[in-house]
Structures are given as structure tokens and as C-alpha cells.
Amino acid sequence: MLVVDLQNDFCAGEVAAARFPGDPALLTRAAANSVRAVELARESGVEVLFVRFLGDVAHQGAAWRRRDARLGKRPKCLEGSPGAEFHGVRPRPDEAVFTKRACFDAFQDPELEPHLRRRGVHHLVLAGLFTDVCVDSTARTAFQRGFHLTVLRDCTTALHLADADVLRFMARVYGARVTDLDRKPFADEAFTDEAFTGDAFEGDAFEQSRAAEVRR
């Protein structure tokens, strides 16, 4: 399981509230469910990996700094600050932490992919923030590197786009299975080829009906 950017500046407090344009309840739910997902993964014996973002100006490229200046954006998750700390959960001593320095894609940390290969990981379960930014960027690279994907729909939310649109895109383009915590995503059968047959949007009648229309 890969937990993406579950940090204070994204999840709670003034910085998060000022940045998130949607219903605050969606952000609260995504963060709380991500914490619960970590607990369930640990109970199931699934390895949990944490990804954190550091947005210090020193880490930013010229284009990033120019964008922030134009939009009046302040850097978030500054190294060593409370805003950069994990929200609601802490990595255990045996759980690896990977760092994105002013970038979206977790694979920009050069240690992530070697770690996954050493551990024999073929399937990543994604939770955290935000669906349309760092979760999608990480999922895109993971797919291109050959990893199967599960995205926990109730453990993430989008910042700029509609949640359903981003998740549908991931299912169609990356072949991701989009599911919820109550569908036991960490059970042994969830990691088999059979789990990826049929509709990728498990338990979603609307998506199932759309898929049926496409097949017709």
C-alpha cells in the first residue's frame, strides 16, 4: 500500500482549508479513511509505504517558482514544519518513507522503484491526496513501469477536477481497479488476476451501467 501525501498542510488546518475548494467533509473523509486503510493493511500483513511532499523554495524548479509567483501560492509542507508532518498516523520503524521534493510523482524519489523490485511488489494500492495531482501522477508512472493498481475511492479526493472523472480515467487508461475499503481491498483474492476482470468500478451501479452501454 502506498499512502500519498497524508500530511497536515493537505489534510487539516488553515492551509488545507484555504487550498481545498470543495466540501471540507470530503477532505476530512479521505484523510480519516486513509488512516483506517493503513490500519487495515497492517492488520492484513500488507506492507505500508509512505510518501511525503516537501515544497520548500529550495526544492522548486524555475517553472514551479514562476507558477507560484503568478498565482500567489505559498510553499506548503516546509521541511521540518508541523505542516509537513504526517496526519493522523505515523510510519512504523519498519515502514519506508519516500520523499517528493516539489514534485508530484512518488517515483521521482529514486529509492521507491528499487524498493518495490527488491520486495517483489507487483500491485500497488493507492490512498491519499490528491486524486488528480499526486495520486494520478504516481499511478501513471506505476502503470508504465508495469505495476497493477488499485485506487481506494473513499481514501482520496480531487483538488481541481471531479472525483468520478479522475477515477474513471485511471480505470480506463491505467487499468486501475477502483474500489472502497468495505470491499476488503487487502484480502488475498484482491491481488489476483480475477480481481481485475469485469467492471473496474466495483460496487458502483452508475459506472456498471455506463460500462454495459459501452459494451453494447
Image (cartoon, grey):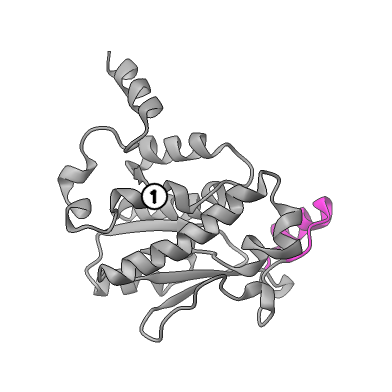
At label 1, counting other C-alpha atoms closer than 10 Å, the crowd grade (few under 14, some 14-19, many 20 or more) is many
Task: Give left or right: position of 124 versus 134.
Answer: left
Write the start and end of the magenta stretch as one range. 60-75
Q: Residue at x 37, y 47 (%)?
A: 180
Q: How many marks?
A: 1
Q: Residue at x 54, y 59 (%)?
A: 31
Identify the residue under disc 1.
151
Q: Residue furthest bottom?
A: 93
Task: Give left or right: position of 215 versus 161.
Answer: left
Q: Is residue 40 above or below residue 144?
A: below
Residue 22 point in image, percent of width and height: 67, 43
Residue 143 point in image, percent of width and height: 35, 50
In-front residue for pair 111/23? 23
In-front residue for pair 126/30? 30
Q: Quadrant of residue 214?
A: top left
Q: Residue at x 59, y 48 (%)?
A: 26
Q: Residue at x 48, y 49 (%)?
A: 136
Task: Give left or right: position of 66 versus 180.
Answer: right
By secondary structure, the bulk of the magenta-drawn segment is best described as helix
Residue 111 point in image, percent of width and height: 41, 75
Q: Describe the element under mark 1 as helix, strand or loop.
A: strand
Please indicate, yes or no, whether residue 58 appears anywhere in the rendered image: yes
In-front residue for pair 31/93? 31
Please indicate, yes or no, whether residue 47 appears anywhere in the rendered image: no
**Does residue 91 show up magenta in the picture?**
no
Task: Give left or right: position of 202 versus 4.
Answer: left
